[in-house]
Image: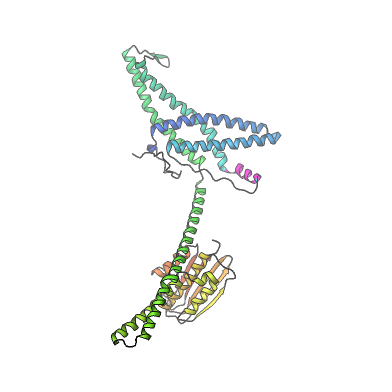
Amino acid sequence: MASTRHTEQQWSATAGELRYRGIRPGYAVLHVATGGAIGIAAFVALTSLLSLTLGLLPTVVGAAISGALLLGVNSALSAVHRSRMRSFLGLHITAPAPMSGDRLVSRLRRVLTTAPLWKSLAYNAIVGLLLFVLGVVVVTSLAAGLVCVTAPIFGTPVSLGSWGLSTQSPFSVAGAVVIGTMLVLAVPPMARAVAYADARIAIALLGRARTEELVQRVEHLAQARTGTVDAADAERRRIERDLHDGTQQRLTALAMNLGVARATLPDLSPSAQAALDQAHAEAKEALVELRGIVRGLHPAVLDDRGLDAALSGLAARSPIPVSLDVVVPQRLPRPVEAVAYFVVSEALTNVVKHSGAGRAQVTARLVDGRLHLRVVDDGTGGADPTRGSGLVGLRQRVASVDGDLTIESPLGGPTVLEAVIPCAL
């Protein structure tokens, strides 16, 4: 059997999370009893303040003060009920988001014309009164049952309606005990049912609407995504800096030392000379590969001079002719520039490796706050976006900044890769 945990653990107040059997009977009785006490007080306070507000409407100022007090008391009562749900049922109900606005009048108008206020008033006043009645029934049943069960012990006379049960008669004693036991046993399921119904109503009237929760969730995910992208970009920068300042410098020194050794040790045996020549050549090749890796991670020119200069460097290093047309009059956010550079770099690498193209064209335009990238080659085509990790990785990288990537590559070519990246991150 599931049991409700009364800890700091919280869950979303949506359908399917709260279970009837998960409510502990003792907590259910306390929940109903406190709810009834709060409910009758809330009904009296809210109806009195509402009547006072309506009665003071001609005075304006008095009505405003009374109305503000009404809103404050209603808000406090809603918070108390949400706390009661959390304490006795382990149910966390998220309060509706506060109204925002530039002016007090604007915020007040939005408060009065939206559903949360009227739903909370309905719960605090109407449901509170009903909860009071049900609470009286539950508490009275429990008290009557305890009196009947303990009547033989203390010799208390028990009266049910017009029939009095004398504790001197064995039959009366047995009847009192049986009736009392039945009442006591009926209280827990009765209290759990009332508590369960109360919680369901509170979820609907005191919690956030489903659409509001979804909007908040989307905003949270967007913020988390931005933080992840920034963290990944910072990590790439750190790796690039470590490779450039550490490993690359050591490889450069190694290649230079091997070159010096070749020039100053002419009397080596042919096998030793061949090994030295091979080591020197491999050191230079490793240095070239490392420089390519560093540029692929995050080229320094991208930070120093922007996307135009970084793409110009890619075009200049390409084994095939690349025509470049970049119209980006301003610096873009760093994540956008990094993704754009990666897209063009990976696209040109695929062109050289797989397409058999003789030339390629790269176009970049900033239109309506969006960066439009287009890479076209005159190769054989046939690129399948669903196959191979390269194109899948490109699509995921673009999607990380809410961009969209499309690839058209019919057999015989040309292959057209287009990426649209929003720049307002």
The image quarter containing residue 235 is bottom left
Provide the major secondary structure of the magenta segment: helix
- The residue that appears at 63% across and 31% down in the rendered structure is 51
Residue nearest the observer in this picture, 289 or 107 = 289
The image quarter containing residue 367 is bottom right
Q: Position of residue 182 (x, y in %)?
A: 36, 24
The image quarter containing residue 184 is top left
Question: Is residue 109 covered in magenta?
Answer: yes
Q: Which residues are magenta?
A: 104-114
For the question of whether residue 44 can be seen, the reply is: yes
Q: Which quarter of the figure is the C terminus placed in?
A: bottom right
- The residue that appears at 51% across and 53% down in the rendered structure is 219
Q: Does 147 sit above or below residue 87? A: above
Q: Position of residue 194 (x, y in %)?
A: 44, 33
Q: Does 71 sit above or below residue 175? A: below
Name the outermost residue toward the top: 168
Q: Does 78 sit above or below residue 232? A: above
167 sits left or right of 409 in the view: left
Q: Position of residue 16 (x, y in %)?
A: 41, 44
For the question of whether residue 383 can be seen, the reply is: no
Residue nearest the observer in this picture, 269 or 67 = 269
Question: Is residue 242 covered in magenta?
Answer: no
Residue nearest the observer in this picture, 319 or 60 = 319
Q: Does 324 sit above or below residue 149? A: below
Residue nearest the observer in this picture, 140 or 293 = 293
Q: Position of residue 362 (x, y in %)?
A: 51, 75
269 sits left or right of 360 in the view: left
